């Protein structure tokens, strides 16, 4: 039988006993509640009302005697005594009515609960007795009325009637019936209380027996668990500990058909498999000795206990010379962190230098890991160090190669800039020999375009980043060159530069610089004729939609009919071609001057912090 089924059966037995005890208690409570309700509806109410009726009857007789005395002495409180007699008789009548209604209600309730004995008692004893008491009380009230009538005539006759008829009737007819009714109610109350006590005693006995049985079952289940589960588990625990210590010949002698028997079989199979497949210490030693990295084993106090041949070869010392030394002694102290952070740094991996026997430094990458014993106690640390001399030499050569390439690229940009300046100078010399002003102006425009490209290469030559330029500084230099180149024509014109500090790659910087050159040159030459003053605004921003480059002036503007009638100039064609080159869109507005706006995507570069 499986352990789970055994435990389930035991728990179900205990739960059944406890549930039976609870059920008995519930039945007892229900019986007590029923008995108390029966007593509340019957006996208790009978005793209380009977007492009240008797007291009211005696009070009416005392009031009758008091009226007689008052009438004889001539006092004037007879009317009050009359009212007192009536009030007492009404109290008695009300008590009789309550008793009759209570008896009828108890009969109906007992019939609904199936209490035939209570129904029979109420119908054969209580209700007939109440009917007799009511008849006698009605007769007593008639006698009381007769007494009051006689009192208004003759006091002596009324006194004889009171003593011989009224009091005699109360003592011989009414009060015996009330006493009999009260005695029967008290007997009924006593019987109900005794029945309740007996039921509670029986219920307590059953409850105690069931709880004792449950406790016995719990003890038996504990003994069963200890012998059937606890003891075999202890044997399995000891066997597992021995297997963990390398004793693979251990076998568990438990032959059962439950989970513990299956677990014992698995432990035996595991021990047999480990015995057949476990790697020998000699094999592990061969692996350690064949490692090319240095391996150093230290105890918790960082004292060297074992090293592999690679460590001996790299450090130029024997294993006996290294054993017993402190681990930090093998490193160059200047490159080590604080002693409290030494192991933490090694656990994360640390590049430092170890000392050769000759004193020469050996650059290494060293890492460490903690060794734990069989029970989790600290056993020391194992450190693995790799000689990174070749890697550092390769890094030095690579760094030198990169510096050389940077120098070559700067030289290329410098020479391109010089060549463009030579071309610009040649165009300048050639334009001086041309008499036609329009042709000379074309030469000057070409010279400006070449200068804009030369400025880009000059920026790259001066900056540390050879792939991108600072477009803000570039636009400032370009506008400055244009102002100086146009001389008096640009003097009354002011420039507003709203250029974000954005790095631009070379494939975007060249066309954007030429676009700015063409549009600013066009504005200086045509927007402000006859020395007119004005403003040229250059804007370059970046947002989520991409880049926005705009050049606007508040000059005379371009008439739309003139733009439609004439073909675009060379400068505008260049702007359109450059816009297509960067996959942008060109928008021209003619409100209060002329505004050229170009939007394009390009690569999005992060903005600098001083934007």
Image (tube, grey):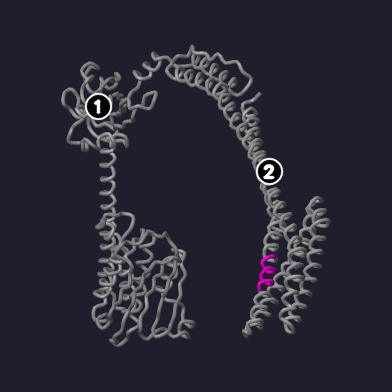
Of the pair 142 and 381, the residue shown nearer to us: 142
* Image coordinates for residue 234, horizontal then vertical, percent: 50, 21
Q: State how many labels appear.
A: 2
Report the span colored magenta.
54-62
Looking at the image, the residue that sits furthest to the front is 156
Q: Mark 1 points at which residue?
A: 301
| In this view, the mark in front (1 or 2) | 2
Point out the image quarter for the C terminus: bottom left
Q: Quadrant of residue 143?
A: bottom right
Q: Is residue 358 above or below residue 132?
A: above
Is residue 491 part of the magenta span, yes or no?
no
Where's residue 64, x and y in %? 69, 75
Chief SS of the magenta region: helix
Residue 518, image x and y in percent? 36, 72
Question: Residue 199, labelled with which disc?
Answer: 2
- Which residue: 35% across, 19% down? 290
Q: How far apart are marks 1 and 2 (CA)?
A: 78 Å
Furthest toward the top, the residue is 249
Q: What element carries label 1?
A: loop
Residue at horizontal 77%, vertical 73%? 141
Out of 75 and 592, give the one closest to the viewer.
Answer: 75
């Amino acid at each position: 039988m499986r352990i789970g089924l055994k435990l389930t059966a035991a728990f179900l037995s205990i739960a059944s006993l406890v549930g039976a005890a609870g059920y008995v208690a519930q039945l007892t409570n229900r019986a007590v509640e029923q008995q108390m309700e029966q007593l509340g509806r019957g006996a208790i109410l009978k005793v209380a009302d009977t007492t009240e009726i008797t007291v009211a009857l005696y009070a009416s007789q005392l009031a009758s005697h008091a009226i007689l005395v008052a009438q004889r002495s001539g006092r004037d409180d007879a009317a009050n005594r009359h009212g007192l007699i009536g009030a007492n008789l009404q109290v008695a009548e009300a008590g009789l009515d309550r008793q009759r209604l209570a008896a009828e209600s108890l009969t109906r309730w007992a019939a609904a609960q199936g209490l035939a004995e209570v129904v029979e008692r109420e119908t054969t004893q209580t209700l007939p007795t109440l009917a007799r008491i009511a008849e006698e009380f009605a007769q007593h009230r008639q006698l009381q009325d007769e007494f009051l009538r006689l009192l208004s005539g003759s006091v002596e006759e009324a006194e004889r009637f009171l003593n011989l008829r009224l009091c005699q009737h109360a003592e011989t007819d009414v009060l015996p019936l009330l006493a009999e009714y009260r005695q029967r109610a008290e007997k009924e109350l006593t019987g109900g209380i005794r029945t309740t006590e007996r039921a509670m005693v029986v219920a307590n006995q059953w409850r105690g027996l069931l709880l004792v049985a449950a406790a016995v079952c719990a003890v038996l289940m504990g003994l069963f668990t200890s012998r059937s589960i606890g003891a075999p588990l202890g044997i399995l625990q000891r066997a597992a500990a021995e297997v963990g210590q390398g004793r693979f010949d251990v076998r568990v002698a438990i032959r059962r058909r439950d989970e513990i028997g299956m677990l014992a079989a698995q432990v035996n199979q595991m021990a047999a498999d480990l015995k057949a497949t476990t790697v020998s210490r000699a094999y592990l030693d061969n692996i350690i000795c064949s490692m090319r990295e240095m391996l150093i084993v230290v105890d918790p106090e960082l004292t060297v206990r074992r090293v592999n041949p690679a460590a001996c070869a790299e450090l130029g010392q024997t294993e006996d010379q290294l054993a017993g030394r402190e681990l930090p002694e093998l490193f160059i102290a200047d490159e080590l962190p604080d002693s409290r952070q030494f192991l933490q740094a090694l656990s994360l991996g640390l590049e430092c230098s170890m000392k050769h026997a000759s004193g020469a430094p050996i650059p290494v990458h060293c890492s460490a890991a903690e060794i734990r014993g069989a029970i989790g106690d600290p056993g020391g640390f194992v450190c693995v160090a790799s000689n990174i001399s070749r890697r550092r030499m390769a890094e030095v050569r690579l760094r030198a190669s990169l510096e050389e390439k940077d120098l070559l690229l700067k030289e290329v940009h410098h020479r391109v800039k010089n060549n463009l300046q030579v071309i610009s100078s040649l165009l300048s010399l050639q334009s001086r020999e041309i008499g036609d002003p329009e042709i000379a102006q074309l030469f000057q425009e070409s010279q400006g375009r070449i200068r804009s490209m030369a400025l880009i290469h000059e920026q790259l030559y001066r900056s540390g980043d050879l792939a991108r330029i600072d477009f803000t500084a570039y636009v400032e230099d370009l506008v400055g060159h244009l102002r100086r180149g146009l001389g008096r024509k640009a003097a009354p014109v002011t420039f507003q530069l709203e250029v974000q500090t954005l790095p631009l790659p070379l494939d975007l910087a060249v066309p954007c610089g030429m676009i700015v050159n063409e549009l600013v040159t066009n504005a200086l030459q045509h927007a402000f004729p006859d020395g007119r003053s004005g403003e040229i605004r250059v804007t370059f921003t970046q947002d989520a939609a991409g880049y926005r480059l705009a050049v606007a002036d508040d000059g005379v503007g371009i008439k739309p009919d003139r733009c439609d009638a004439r073909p675009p100039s060379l400068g505008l064609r260049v702007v359109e071609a450059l816009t297509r080159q960067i996959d942008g869109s060109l928008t021209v507005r003619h409100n209060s001057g002329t505004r050229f706006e170009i939007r394009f995507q390009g690569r999005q570069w992060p903005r600098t912090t001083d934007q």
